[in-house]
Image (tube, helix red, strand yellow):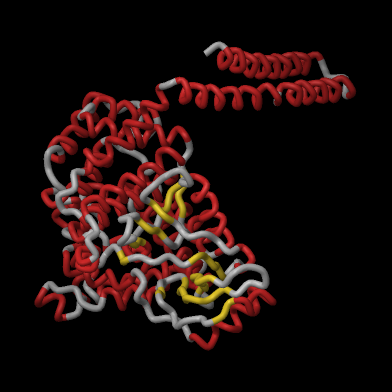
Amino acid sequence: MPFSAYFRLLRAGYVLAREGALSIISTRDLPPALAPLRAGIWLGRLIERPSVRKTGHVERLTRALNLLGPTYVKFGQTLATRPDVVGAAIANDLAGLQDRMDPFDAALVPGILAAALEDKATELTELSAPIAAASIAQVHRATLKPANGPNKIVAVKILRPGVQARFMADIESFYAAARLANRFAASTKRLRPVEVVETLDRSAQLELDLRLEAASISEMAENIKDDTGFVIPSVSWDHVAQNVLTTSWVDGIPIREHAALDAAGVDRKALAANLLQSFLRHAIRDGFFHADMHPGNLFADPRSGDVIAVDFGIMGRINRQERRFLADILYGFITRDYRMVAERHFDIGYVPKGQSVDDFALAIRSIGEPLHGRTAADISMARVLGQLFAITDLFDMQTRPELVLLQKSMVLVEGVARALDPDLDIWSVSEPVVGEWLRKQAGPMGQMESLGEHLKTAVEAAGRVPTILAQAELALADYHARKQQPADLVLRRALLGLIGLAAVTLLAVLWRVLTL
């Protein structure tokens, strides 16, 4: 790890501490696993601006995050949706990170388009000034005048020049922080910080190629083609490059502008429910979901009340096992079946086998029971998250890196939904989507799908048997050619036995699957 990564990390810590970021954290509420951070937080607060120390008001945090780079901005965007965690004043300040950042020089745009799209760039005319500028890219409105076909209004997204280098530098410093945590804070190892950063790294690299974003829009469009209430733009593939993405233009009211929604007669309660249910449908049914649903990327159609989503640079994907885990956990909380919730955590390996299922079920109940019968306005997510973290520490639970994007996205979506409707009952809204999917999985179609996956696994296993046998023959020929000593005969027979056992095991797996 180059020294520059540690220098950037030190600088980031200084800037955030100076602007009062550490005042957001209450050291009294830190769980035992993070207790070593208390001394560092206390020292960091010594360099806070006097205005923060005197008034407790965090100023200029948005500016500090902008200075630090795009990955820090992404973190700030997540916090902006959680006034229940960081406070309303800080959340309101951070809201400016979502799509109101300073744009890059407009004089660079024609050259970027010409280099990326070549002759096709001339079909994009009447480019507006940037209508939205975020940490990664900015968006322009334009008129597309194709050689064949009618003119249409489009949105042209262009990556910020040099953003990839800045992103990679930020990620490098995150790796440095993760490795330091692994080395000097043993209590954080179970959180697997390096693996978590690897997940973020992978996500960032995908976000920096707009061709992949175009493919994500295409895949989601296929998934939701029969759905209602959730709308996404379409892609103009002739005008897509690594740093340029052109999509159809969508009109709507920004979902964070509650007064405008009310003036247009949009039912905010229905909008909040639709948003939450759409996200769960995409995650549980499709295993493919928008993983950056902050308010800057969401709009409402005033005519239909539909949710309109844009910016598909960060997408999440979970496999069938993880989808079933998510559905079971949510349904367990909905029906207050905490024993089932606990068992599913053990089944997926989230809780070590040596722990007690009964004790874990009791801990889950202590979280779930206070949430039932209460509206979003009555629930302090800061307290709930702190309790969840304390339980993971108590039961020595490991972080699941493959679920990091899902967990982050659920926090975002729930934060946006509760802002739209403070009386939102999360469990009642979730039940139709979760219950329907689970009932489908228990039915004939779900069983056939499950059997199909087992058959695929079995066929792949059976297909490896000839390779194993061929390798065995080669090994035997090699031993025979070299005329092994009598002592080697035992090793040869042992090798044959192991190879035979492997082949029999694969065939047994095939037989077991076919007889399920």
Of residues 44 and 371, the one nearer the viewer is 371
- Nearer-the-camera pick, 194 or 245: 245
Position of residue 59 measured from the top left corner of the image (x, y, whole percent): 21, 77
Q: Residue furthest front?
A: 150
Residue 22 appearing in the image: no
Q: Is residue 323 left or right of residue 43?
A: right
Residue shown at 25%/25% (left/top)?
339
Q: How many marks?
A: 0
Left of 440 or right of it: where is 61? left
Q: Is residue 269 left or right of residue 514?
A: left
Expressed as whole percent of the image width and height from the top left, the position of residue 327 reads: 35, 34
**Place of residue 310 in the rendered image (x, y in percent of width and height, measured from the top left):** 43, 61
Front-most of residues 44 and 372? 372
Where, by quadrant of the figure, is residue 482 drawn? top right
Instruction: Evaluate whether residue 354 shows in this view.
Output: yes
Residue at the image point whose x is 20% and y is 48% from the top:
386
Viewer-proximal residue among 345 and 468: 345
Residue ranking furthest to the bottom: 107
- Compared to 461, does 238 lie above or below? below
- Percent x, y of residue 253: 31, 66
Res 463 → quadrant: top right
Q: Is residue 314 above or below residue 187?
A: below
User: As drawn, is 42 to the left or to the right of 69?
Assistant: left
Looking at this view, name the residue that lies furthest to the right: 481
